[in-house]
Amino acid sequence: MKKIVNKRATQVAALSILSSLPILSKVDIVNANSNIELEFESIADKYDANDIIVENGVSIKKGETLDLSQYSGWEMSNNETVEIDENGIVYPIKEGTVFLSNKIDNKIHILEVYVSGDKTIMYANQRANSVNRDFYKVFVDPGHGGSDNGASGFGKFEDELSLQIAKSVELKLKQKGIQVKMSRTSDVFIPLGERAQMANAYGADAFISIHLNSSSNESSNGIETYHHTQKTSHRPYSTGIHNNAIKSTQGRDRGVKSANFVVLRETNMVSSLFETGFISNAQENNKLSDPVYQDKLAVSIANGIESYLKENVKLNPGSQIPEEKPPINSNVKYGIVTATNLNVRSGYGTSYSVIGSLSKGSKVEIVESKNGWYKIKYGSRYGFISSSYIKNSDGSDDITNSGEKPSISNSKNGVVTATSLNIRSGYGSSYSKIGSLTKGSKVEILESKNGWHKIKYGNRYGYVSGEYISTSNTNQPQITPPSSNGSKSGVVTATSLNVRSGYSSSYSKIGSLTKGNKIEILESKNGWYKIKYKNGYGYVSGEYIKI
């Protein structure tokens, strides 16, 4: 947003004193205060929503002042929280929230000022560089919400777009195995002080607030990122996120800056406020409304957060179960997510809790499988996903085991005769379906059992019913020619062998034979036998006849 105030609050204590202050304990999460929202609405309702710009709120404490002398004529939503002298200097009176408004450049600017009840300044408050768990926690704060639209431009509102981008960031972080909490997941109003309290109570390792910028100059454009004015140690965190975004989007670099924003000052963990671009600029407005561009921003933000955490926060599981290590010699399997959004759970089945999610196209490393579920590597630990929504990286439905290579010895060729033939994971229709073949597809048959063929399928094996495979002339099973009297005998080896009306599985079924049945063979053709069947003739696959 257009910054209209001096973000640097007057200091009342030396930094050497600040470094010795104790870290505050967690506070209970407080629900959004409806009275504060009503107070905000008492100002906002006077104007058209498109004429309002809600600034990023600032924090002051007793003993500090806020300089608003650049513009005169500020109005206050209440007279109990702060007072403004004739020179435009703001003095805190008591803990609470107040909204200051002023008309600047034909826009109504509303500034939320949060007066903290704590007289001390927590600039030195940072979380430890190690945590007693095996995963990271990030708090994501979509700016504004509810009756607070933030800024607007070309029919779009900041609170709506910031939420869309924040949800995408949430998803990207969860895909990395990072636990995420959002300040809001819908269009609701939450005071800034309470957002910080929520993050502190959650015990996040990092905080990110997502906003859109605005200016009376419609040509203004670019990305800028903030850390708190006195939390200079947080600058590398903001810099990493910022540089990733500039590189990914090729947007104008407006730099990494500092400000006294509430959510940056009142949070106890490393924090950053990210301005994604200008909603007041037509070109950037269009990009920021585009899901593809939002996704690009989200990836760069999530990558920046992850990189910082891995470099600066050590995971220390402590009393938790140590991370499992897959066997050194185990074959690595990979798969691709086919669902739009696939839940990652804490165990084999939907009864286990959701610990994250994966988006369509995500690549996973599979450690083992059980009851239709895969155990996968997920961030710094393991997760469990349904195998129904995983395909091999080559697009087939099976999962490749890089250590398994199908044998090509003693193989023969066949052609699919069915319109669509299921490929199964074992010899029989009771096994799970892992893919399908269309009519005319050629297959390499490795071996046969109980009326089924084991075939090469992608980089592994599959199993298909021999009923719907016509074997080629080049590699037919060895069939003994009829004896001099024109016939010979054979025994059925399959559990159930279909008898057809012609020399292939494309002909209609006229009956069946069971294992051990004796037959009289009259002639052979293309791997099939013509046999005496009831009062006429029938045709059976030579694969399942022992002479």
Image (tube, rainbow, N blue to C red):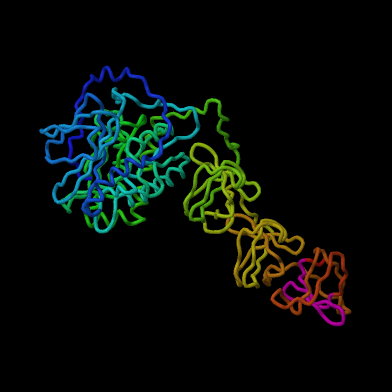
198 sits to left or right of 217: right
Q: Residue furthest front?
A: 79
**164 lies above or below 199:** below
Q: Position of residue 537 (x, y in %)?
A: 82, 80
Q: Residue furthest bottom?
A: 536
User: Would you say residue 222 is visible in this rendering?
Assistant: no
Q: Position of residue 170 (x, y in %)?
A: 42, 45
**476 lies above or below 124:** below
- Point out the image quarter for the C terminus: bottom right
Q: Which residues are magenta?
A: 521-543
Q: Position of residue 434 (x, y in %)?
A: 62, 58
Quarter residue 130 falls in: top left
- Point out the image quarter for the N terminus: top left
Q: Nearer the viewer, residue 349 or 2?
A: 2
Q: Position of residue 110 (x, y in %)?
A: 22, 44
- 525 drawn magenta: yes
Q: Nearer the viewer, residue 263 or 491?
A: 263
Q: Nearer the viewer, residue 63 or 291?
A: 63
Q: Residue at image x 36%, y 49%?
A: 165
3 sits to left or right of 131: left
Q: Nearer the viewer, residue 317 or 40?
A: 40
